[in-house]
Image: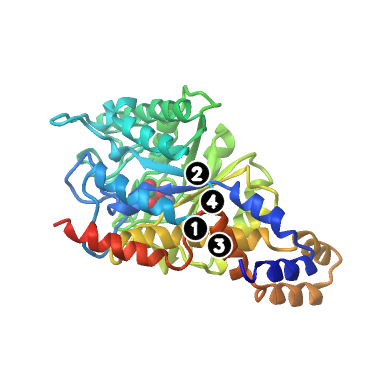
Amino acid sequence: MSNFNEAKAVFKRYGVDVEKALEELASIPVSLHCWQGDDVTGFDHDGPLTGGIQTTGNYPGRARTPEELMADLDQVIKLVPGAKKINVHACYAIFEKGEFVDRDKIEPRHFKKWVEFAKKHGMGLDFNPTFFSHPMAASGLTLSSPDETVREFWINHGRACVKISEYFAKETGIPCVMNIWTGDGLKDVPADRLGPRLRYKDSIDKILADYDKNLVKPCVESKVFGIGVESYTVGSAEFALSYAAKKGCLPLMDNGHYHPTEYVSDKISALLAFFPEIALHVTRPVRWDSDHVVAYDDETREIAKEIVRNDAIKRVYIALDYFDASINRIAAWTVGARNMQKALMYAVLQPNRRLKELQDAMNYTELFVLQEELKMLPYSDIWEEYLRRQGVPGDEWFDIVKKYEKDVLSKRK
Ligand code: RNT
Ligand code: ZN
C-alpha cells in the first residue's frame, strides 16, 4: 500500500486513471490450461505425447491423477490474480474405476468433476478435442487422413467434444471456447497438398454441423510445423484463417506457430478488422514452438497492448499454452499466468489515447520518447496493490510453492 498513492499520482500525470485501469484488468478472463500440470498427459492413455509436440525435462512431482492435478491447479489459482477460466483437453476425461471409453464415445458425464471444479471456483470452462497421443493418430494424420475409418473416428471425437462443450457452457453459464487443433502433416515432401486440406475442411464441417452458437465458440488453430512433420502442415495459417472466415468460427493464433520473425501482436488488429471475435494461445517460443513458460517480455506486453488499446477485451479470448517439465510445474504454471496478468496490467496503464493522437499527428519524435518514458513508470507499486486487492500473495508466492513441493509434490514417487 505504501507507495501506491504516489504511483497513482505519477500515472495520473500521464493521463492514466489507475482505479479505472485496475477495474478493467480484473474483468479480463485468462484461460488456465490444465495441461501444464502433467506434461500434456491426461488420464485416458499410457502412451507418449504425440502430434508433433513435446515436453522436455523430468522434474519430480508430476500430477498423475485427477485428484492430484486438481489439487495442484487449486494452488495455482490461489496465486494468480484476475478473472480466470479453466481450459480442459478431452484426454483429461475422468472415468469410473475400471471404466474406459474411447475418444469417439466420450460423454459429458466423463467431465462432471471438471464442472464441479469450475463451479467451486466460479469459473467458466474451455475445451479441446485431443487429436493426438492415441493409436488412431499413429500415422500423424487424423481429420485429414485418407483412411476413412481413421477420419471418421476423429470426426466422431470432434462431435462428442461439441456436446461436452455445450454441457460446460450450460453448467457454468459461460460460453465454452472449443479449439480444434491437429498436428496433421507430413515429414517429407508431399505428392498431394490439396487432398489432405480438403479432407480436413470436410471433417471440420462435419464436426461443426450442429452446435449451439450461444454456448460454444469453435476455433481453428493453425500451425507452421511440428516435430516429425517438418515438410507440410495441413492446418496452416492460410488454411485456418480461410476456414474461420468462410465458416464463421474463430481463428486461433498461438504465438509459437509462426516463423520466428513474425509477431502475433501485429496480426491481432489485422484479424480484428474482419472477425467479430478471435482467440489466442499465449506461449513463449524459443527459436521454435518450444512452449516455454510465458515471460514478462516485449511480445507478451505487445499482445496485451493490442487487446486493450483496440477495445477488444470482449472480442479476444485469451488462453495460455505452455508446458515445461524441466522446472517445478506449479511454479511454471503460476509464473506464466502472473506474467500474462502483468502484461495486461502494463497495457491498461498506458495512456493509449494520447499515444494514438501522437501517431495520428505524425509526431513520431514525441511518440517514441513517450513510449520509452512509459517503460520506467512505477508499475510494481500498482502490481503490489492489485495483488493485495485480489487477495493474492506478492513475491512470497514462491515460498508457498516451495512448501507445497516439500509437503506434497516430493511425496509423489
Ligand atoms: C500445439 C498446439 C496446441 C497444443 C494443446 C495441448 O502446437 O499449440 O494448442 O499445445 O492443444
Ligand atoms: Zn496452442
Mark 1 or 3, nearer chain start: 1
Q: Quadrant of the C terminus?
A: bottom left
User: What's under tag 3, amino acid-wise?
Assistant: Lys
Mark 1 or 4, nearer chain start: 4
Q: Which residue is identified by label 3? A: 342
Q: In the drawing, what numbered circle is on residue 255?
A: 1
- Spatial CA distance of label 1 from label 4 is 22 Å
Question: Label 3's element?
Answer: helix
- Spatial CA distance of label 3 from label 4 is 10 Å
| In the image, residue 150 above or below residue 258 | above
Mark 3 or 2, nearer chain start: 2
Of marks 3 and 4, the one in the foreground:
4
Q: Which residue is identified by label 2? A: 240
| In the image, residue 404 above or below residue 218 | below
- Spatial CA distance of label 1 from label 2 is 14 Å
Counting from the top left corner in percent of width and height, residue 386 is at 58, 59
Indicate left or right for 20 with 34 as reference: right
Question: Label 4's element?
Answer: loop
Indicate left or right for 180 with 362 as reference: left
| In the image, residue 247 above or below residue 308 | above
Of marks 4 and 2, the one in the foreground:
4
Q: Which residue is identified by label 4? A: 82
Mark 1 or 2, nearer chain start: 2
Q: Residue at x 49, y 58 (%)?
A: 255
Q: Are marks 1 and 3 in contact (CB under 8 Å)?
A: no
- Spatial CA distance of label 1 from label 3 is 18 Å
Dot 1 crowding, Cα within 10 Å, few <14, some 14–19, many 20+: many
Outermost residue to the right: 361
Q: Nearer the viewer, residue 173 or 1?
A: 1
- Spatial CA distance of label 4 from label 2 is 30 Å
Q: Nearer the viewer, residue 201 or 122?
A: 122
